[in-house]
Amino acid sequence: MEAAGWSFDLFSRYLAPAIEELLKSAVIFYLIRKKRIGFMIDAAIYGFAAGTGFALCENLFYIYSLEDTSLLTWVIRGFGTAVMHGGCTALFAIIYLGAKSRGRMITPMVLAGLGLAYVIHSLFNHFYIHPVIQTLVIVISLPVMFVLIFRYNETLLRDWMELELSSEVEMLKMIRQGRFSATRAGEYLISLKDRFAGEVVLDMYCYLQLYLELSLKAKRNIMLRENSLPFPPEDGIVGKLAELKALRKRIGPVGELSLSPLIRMNYRDIWKLNQLSAS
């Protein structure tokens, strides 16, 4: 403030929200880059945790910096400011993960998410209404928002598991029974011989079979974890994941794009396989 010649009100309303939202969002960038977040409810939880962690550090700073405070000050900071920090970062995480999962408009959606978090944070710091009323609004509205997100996530997860699981089971069954070439998917893969060398098509076939096997195991582990059941022991998972990675590299981006009608390797699919390696 001294260097820029800004007043405290100007700094807290416009510059501080930008700095703080960028700091909190850095945690989300890291977690998504490392494929630690898979679904919207995960994004909401991690985002809220990052935001409230920041608020905890901020409040500890104020405890040692402010001399004259009251219980009302800490009620507002604990239930209002802290929850606002968590809510803003959770919103950004949800928007960012949604764009990442769809694989399109990622940069515009990141900017939109950061912009939304900044606007909410800045408006909160303006104190247009009484701080106690602001705190009540936040404490009531955010839980409602998270309940709606949780319900939407449950629907999304159920559809993803049911639709993909049934198609992957059927496709892998056909491959293991030697009847895959008689299916439409098999005919499509055979048609790629006109565009790729024979060894590349063979690598595509191996990639498809190995991916289906690992994908089904990953979904099984997700369902077991959701029901608090132990995972069965698996041998050779690390080797199979390394083999899948090598096959993916050999077929190249064009080969992977050609297989996209059969299987997709988007953000959520990579996250799913990472969960398999972690388990």
Image (cartoon, grey):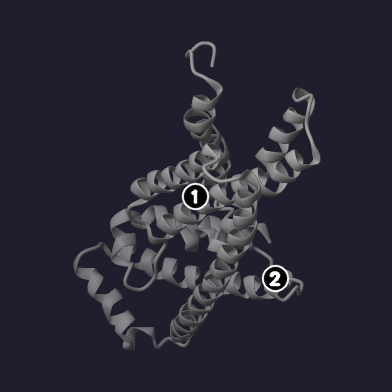
Query: Nearest the camera: 3 or 245?
Result: 3
Asked which secondary structure carries label 1, the reply is helix
Q: Position of residue 130 (x, y in %)?
A: 60, 45
- Residue 15 got which mark? none
Q: Name which residue lies at 42% across and 70% down.
A: 208
Query: Nearest the camera: 30 or 70?
Result: 70
Q: Which label's residue is closer to the chain start, 2 or 1?
A: 1
Please give the count of numbered marks on the rendered protein. Answer: 2
Residue beneath disc 1 = 92
Query: Nearest the camera: 80 or 198?
Result: 80
Residue type highlighted by circle 2: Arg
Position above or below: 155 against 147: below
Q: Is residue 246 visible?
A: yes
Mark 2, other Cα within 10 Å: few <14 / some 14–19 / many ≥20: few
**Residue 225 found in image quarter:** bottom right
Position above or below: 22 against 216: above
Q: Is residue 39 visible?
A: no
- The N terminus is located in which quarter? top right
Mark 1, other Cα within 10 Å: few <14 / some 14–19 / many ≥20: many
**Residue 61 found in image quarter:** top right
Judged by depth in the image, the label closer to the viewer, 2 or 1, is 1
Residue beneath disc 2 = 225
Image side of residue 264 versus residue 143, left or right = left
Residue type highlighted by circle 1: Phe
Query: Nearest the camera: 23 or 34?
Result: 23
